[in-house]
């Protein structure tokens, strides 16, 4: 039994067909990666919104209870100043929480679709033409002799 090598090349059309198949395979992998990242981003946003809504609800209940406690504590003489201080504290805390939540939603690890963008950049870098290597190594820079 004689062993035969790979089948002979079918020419230009066979080569183009293989190139097209490879290109479609790469595109399919990139689209699958994009879909996976889109799903992860959607889950991350849903999780953040769900937690934010629940946190706001609980903070609202705590706010009402805390203000009621402070007003009852200072009912006799300092009712209005206690309400003013509580209001200022809650406004400052609420603004800080909203700014922090906005910063968290903006900063996802490298932004949305960072993996897909990185893979596409690597693909682009791989398709760049390689500069031809010169036959002789570069000559060292000329140096002048220093003063004696």
Image (cartoon, rainbow, N blue to C red):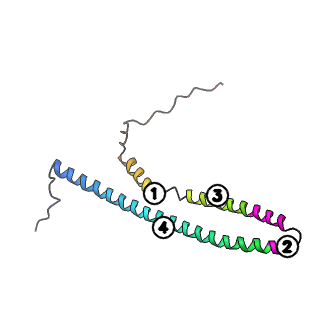
Q: Is residue 8 left or right of residue 107?
A: left
Q: Is residue 45 above or below residue 120?
A: below
Element class at badge 1:
loop
Contact, CB < 8 Å: mark 1 with mark 4?
A: no
Dividing the picture into quadrants, the one containing residue 52 is bottom right
Identity of the residue drawn at 59% across and 26% down: 145
- Mark 2–mark 3 distance (CA, rounded to whole Å): 34 Å
- Mark 3–mark 1 distance (CA, rounded to whole Å): 24 Å
Element class at badge 3:
helix
Contact, CB < 8 Å: mark 2 with mark 3?
A: no
- Mark 2–mark 1 distance (CA, rounded to whole Å): 56 Å
Q: Which residue is mark 3?
A: 99
Identity of the residue drawn at 28% across and 56% down: 24
> Of the residues under marks 3 and 1, which one precedes in the sequence?
3
Identity of the residue drawn at 45% across and 58% down: 115
Q: Which residue is mark 2?
A: 75
Identity of the residue drawn at 76% across and 61% down: 88
Label 1 crowd bin: few (<14), some (14–19), many (20+), radius 10 Å:
some
- Mark 2–mark 4 distance (CA, rounded to whole Å): 47 Å
> Of the residues under marks 2 and 3, which one precedes in the sequence?
2
Q: Is residue 136 left or right of residue 10?
A: right
Q: Nearer the viewer, residue 3 or 80?
A: 80
The magenta span reads 70-89
Mark nearest the camera among 1 and 4 is 4
> Of the residues under marks 1 and 4, which one precedes in the sequence?
4
Q: Quadrant of the C terminus?
A: top right
């Amino acid at each position: 039994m004689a062993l035969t090598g790979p089948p002979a090349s079918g020419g230009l059309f066979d080569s183009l067909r293989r190139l097209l198949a490879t290109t479609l395979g790469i595109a399919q992998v990139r689209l699958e990666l994009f879909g996976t990242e889109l799903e992860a981003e959607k889950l991350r946003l849903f999780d953040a919104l769900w937690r934010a809504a629940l946190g706001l609800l609980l903070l609202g209940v705590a706010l009402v209870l805390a203000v009621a406690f402070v007003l009852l504590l200072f009912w006799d003489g300092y009712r209005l100043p206690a309400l003013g201080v509580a209001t200022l504290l809650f406004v400052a805390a609420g603004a800080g929480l909203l700014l922090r939540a906005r910063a968290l939603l903006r900063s996802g690890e490298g932004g949305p679709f960072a993996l897909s963008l990185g893979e596409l950049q690597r693909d682009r870098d791989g398709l760049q033409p390689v500069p031809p290597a010169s036959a002789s190594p570069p000559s060292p820079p000329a140096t002048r002799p220093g003063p004696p």
